[in-house]
Amino acid sequence: MAVGKVTFTKAEREKLAEVLWLLNWISVVTGAILFGLGLFLKIEIQKWQEVMSDQGILYVPHMLISTGLAACCINFLGGKICLDCADTNKFLRWKLVMMPYVVCTFFFTSCVLAGALMCYSIRSQLEESLFLGLRNAMRYYKDTDTPGRCYLKRTLDLLQIQFHCCGNTGYRDWFQVQWISNRYLDMTSSAVVDRLRNNVEGKYLMDGVPFSCCSTFSPRPCIQQQVSNSSAHFNYDQQSQQLNLWRRGCRQTLLDHYTGIMQSIGLTVLLIWLFELLVLTGVRYLQTAMENVLRLGDPESESDGWILENSLAETARSNFNIIKNLGKCYQIDDDPNINVPTAAAEQEVLSQQVQIPVTS
Amino acid sequence: MPFMPVKFNLQKRVKLAQGLWMLYWLSVIVGILIFSLGIFFKIELRKRSEMMDNNESHLVPNLLILVGVLACGVNAFGGKVCHDSLDPIKFAKWKPMLKPYLLLCCGFNVLLLLTALLCFLMQFAMYLTLAEGLKNGIKFYKDTDTPGRCFMKRTLDMTQIEFRCCGNNNFRDWFEVQWISNRYLDMSNDEVKDRVLSNVEGKYLMDSVPFSCCNPGSPRPCLQHHLTNNSAHYDYDHRTEELNIWTRGCREALFSYYSSMMNSIGALVIATIFLESVDMAGLKYLSTALEMMSDPENPECESEGWLLEKGVKETFTELLAKLKMLGKTNQVEEGGEAATAAT
């Protein structure tokens, strides 16, 4: 009771082989596309890596890159195999390789699916990583003289300018960190000393934001200091306040940016997965059809192709038995070269009972 | 005595036709490239036309677009002729058109040369337009409530951020204009009144720059105000401070951007001139080789192809004589008419 049984004539087999050769070459191209998408995502993530606290998100592009390369190799080999499969004589060359090839391609196709699903599931981890990363970046904004953190100011400024965002959740996050280094604060000034003393941790906090938070859409020159004090500036009404700085938080903006990219990549990878599945099914049919032709002995005759020889339950059962017996093989030691004088007869009886099934 | 003759047998003719066909299609692709570069250049000019007072000349991109389209057409025709050249019946159709076509190609080459020259010479006009436009841009920075100028502030801020520049020549240009609108100045404040009165034209001038001049790579938070006053900021010397704001002027920045674009386009046009000349030479050889076949029925025969039927000097003198004859025929006709009119 085969699964998906289809009968092929000789002409149909040859046609199938040709079509599969073409599809395999298209798959090489899609594999290259997959590789390119992975590379693009890696570069996009690395651009703003400094504001992400953990680098775990990088396994998504790495997965895409490796599956892309694997796709190119596997489908290149598949193209070669399918071209030879049209002729029964040439098929004999590949007969032993075909089954492992099909199994390999099946696992590889599931990797592609896993890659696509990862693209969609990464959002929560990314949000956490961005939250922590941006918080640290804002804390170390002033440390332009500390090695390892000297470019954090520049990165954060460029981020806020490019993505039109300010702070982690909003511009008020800047009120809670000291973003002016002590090197540039005049410690002899009483105003500075007062402000430092006001704060429990001795930080110089103020309701001011860096220049990169300034909105280019504001009709008035940017107000960076005393942002929340409307009486400190002339004609500083509600509307001016709204337009003055970027209102969005950088975490949300970056999250949206990366989610958008990964959703499009995920969709493309899903389409590639469907295509690979199609190619895999075709190769499996071709493999079984060619093997059946060889079994029948007459190259001109019709033959059956299928996906699974027996039903799904039986195949699962037989595979499970194979794995069980593999385990049993290693337990019983019936190697004749080992001299075990005691219970030799017992072992002989046991070894006769073990059946090593033949794999199809 | 033909100029640069080459002997062709059948194989060579076929090879020449095939090679020339590929070269013509390459020229079509180059024509498409010139067309798209023209469109790209036009878009770039439009994007920043506010910085140039909406006064910029679109002559170069329009000419590039025209030249690109012409190149496609001319070279596609040449390719078709080459493709048909090995079939005598089809080639006979094209034979009478070849001479005018080659003259057209010559004219096209002259047009390409003109375009390349313009690419290099219009840069001077662009420099002057940029200087004028930026000066006005800085002047109207504060007029965000005047219709027609309300986006000048935004455009100038984005230009300064994108091109990493400040002001026209340098950041001091901002010290000479009032870039904060009166709407946001508290006229009842003494300080403000002092500053406005101390200026001849009643402008509120200060030694400050807008935030878009700030350099993100500076190690200290940006200092925008009181830039020339060392005591206004802790540990600040305005003479040695280089990283705080962008020191380059926007005119230089924009000009170098546009001039590199125009230079590369000009270089591509010059390369196209060479390509077209090679095409023309190849076509001339092919057509003369096919015409000069001693036995038209036998395709295997040898023939000779050349660039010019007589030497360069002789062809030139013939051309001049022809032109003179054209002039004289008009005169003779007039004389004849006058004679007939008189009689």
Image (tube, rainbow, N blue to C red):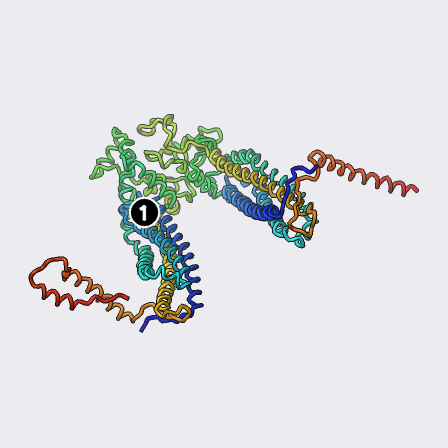
The answer to whether one can see residue B197 in this image is yes
Res. B7 image quadrant = top right
The residue at which mark 1 appears reads as A170
The answer to whether one can see residue B182 in this image is no
The one nearer the camera, A191 or B339, is B339
Pinpoint residue B326: horizontal percent, then vertical percent.
78, 40
Quadrant in which the C terminus of chain B is drawn: top right
Q: Which residue lies furthest to the bottom in this view?
A: A1
Pinpoint residue B153: horizontal percent, then vertical percent.
45, 41
The amino acid type, in three-letter code, at marker 1 is Gly
Pinpoint residue A130: horizontal percent, then vertical percent.
29, 48
- Chain at tag 1: A
Does residue A268 lie above or below A200 as drawn?
below
> Is residue A319 toward the left or the right of residue A158 in the image?
left
Residue density around tag 1, few if under 14, some if 14–19, many if 20 or more, within 10 Å: some
Q: Residue furthest left?
A: A342
Pinpoint residue A108: horizontal percent, then vertical percent.
32, 57
Q: Is mark 1 on a helix, strand or loop?
A: loop
Does residue B245 lie above or below A159 as drawn?
above
> Is residue B24 toward the left or the right of residue A29 in the image?
right
Quadrant in which the N terminus of chain B is drawn: top right
> Is residue A316 toward the left or the right of residue A292 in the image?
left
> Is residue A109 toward the left or the right of residue B256 in the image?
left
The one nearer the camera, A360 or A154, is A360
**How many badges with numbers are in the image?**
1
Res. B309 image quadrant = top right
The one nearer the camera, A289 or A230, is A289
The one nearer the camera, B136 or A159, is A159
Q: Residue furthest right?
A: B343
